[in-house]
Image (cartoon, helix red, strand yellow):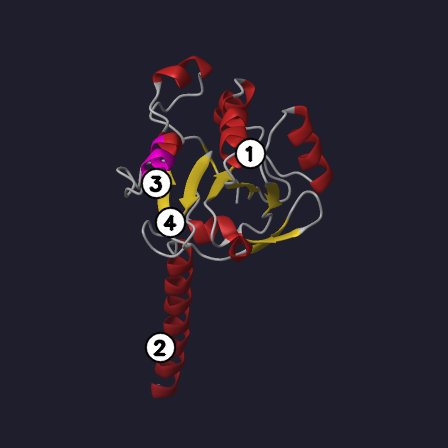
Amino acid sequence: MLKITLARFCKYALMIATLVSSSLAFAAAKSGQAAPDFSLPSASGDTVKLSDYQGKYVILEWTNHDCPFVKKHYGSGNMQALQKQYTGEDVVWLSIISSAPGKQGNVSATEAMALTKSRDAHPTHVLLDSSGDVGKAYGAKTTPHIYVITPQGKLAYMGAIDSIKSADPADIPKADNYLQLAMADLSQGKAVAQPLTKPYGCSVKY
């Protein structure tokens, strides 16, 4: 009887440890702390490591081309304008696709390249995270979901792209753009006034 009890105890202890470990991994990314490093294949065939860009600002953008909220920002040209603005200032912009195979938004490298060209998008790289490991490490919940990483590798901003939670492009000019506000604070040597906001959009299709 004791042997069975111990066996069950060990089984449950292992299950709890696994759950705790998974939970910690999902919640690893926190504002003000070190951004989790990662290595992902890009649509152009390169392998991209976050740590390769230490010393530069990095913007992470979770995306899904079929999501109406993503279409709002790409169809209006808003996302492309932000990409051009910041990559023109030597900021690294990484668009990340974490949709799992068979789920909405999952694309091949060739399809991702074609999307980038057809939308006149200007990220530094489009990264393919079909396992969802990087998205989960960052706690990415929606498309879009925006993160800003400092040259020191710290997360300075996590959250929505702007303040109006809608899929209507007409709302873009009326919204406070949280990404621009965060970058403006950082460019002036200030801490980001709103380092964490609630993201909106479609759920990431893990």
Q: Residue at x 66, y 38 (%)?
A: 107
Extreme residue in the bottom direction: 2
Rendering coords of residue 44 (x, y %): 70, 43
- In which quarter of the view is residue 5 placed? bottom left
- Left or right of 51 on screen, residue 180: left
Dot placed on the residue nearer the N-terminal end, 3 or 2: 2
Q: Which residue is mark 1?
A: 64
Dot placed on the residue nearer the N-terminal end, 2 or 1: 2
Marks 2 and 1: which is nearer the front?
1
Q: Secondary structure at mark 2?
A: helix
Q: Are discs 4 and 1 less than 8 Å apart at CB? A: no
Magenta residues (range): 181-188
Marks 4 and 1: which is nearer the front?
4
Q: Residue at x 59, y 35 (%)?
A: 105
Kindly identify which numbered label has been placed on residue 186.
3
Marks 4 and 3: which is nearer the front?
3
Q: Which residue is mark 2?
A: 9
